[in-house]
Amino acid sequence: MNIKDDKIKIMLIADALKNHTRLKILEIISNNPQLSHKEIAEKVGKSESLITFHMKYLRSAGLVLEDQVPGSKSRLKKVPRLNIKKIVIKL
């Protein structure tokens, strides 16, 4: 990676972390692995479509990955997992 790529990555992460709902999603995922978007939505108190919207930000920033696992009625469901262990900011 070059400096320009690093700056872009930092901006994506900063943008993802500036939203309270996305921070709450990260907290929930870290404490409750294997939850679906629907289950996360129930815990956050937001709609499933809004959780899906926020998950796109978190994925694009590289903070979460999503696996597809068997769900009910032979459907696959997306299950997010953290792609980070910790974030350290040195100033």
Image (spheres, rainbow, N blue to C red):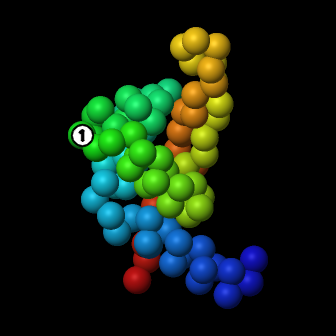
**Is residue 36 toward the left or the right of residue 4 in the image?**
left
Image quadrant for the N terminus?
Answer: bottom right
Q: Along the line of sight, which residue is nearer the eye, 73 or 89?
A: 73
Residue 39, picture quadrant = top left
In the orientation shown, which residue stands out farthest toward the top?
73
Instruction: Identify the amino acid type marked 1.
Output: Gly
Residue 14, picture quadrant = bottom left
**Is residue 27 toward the left or the right of residue 56 in the image?**
left
Question: Callout 1: helix, strand or loop?
Answer: loop
Q: Is residue 19 visible to us here? A: yes
Where residue 67 appears, x then y in whole percent?
A: 64, 34
In the orientation shown, which residue stands out farthest toward the bottom?
4
Taking the spot 51% from the left edge, 78% from the top edge, the residue there is 11
Can you say whether 57 is above or below 10 in the image? above
Q: Along the line of sight, which residue is nearer the eye, 69 or 26?
A: 69
Residue indicated by mark 1: 45
Where residue 24 appears, x then y in whole percent?
A: 31, 49
Q: Along the line of sight, which residue is nearer the eye, 61 or 91?
A: 61
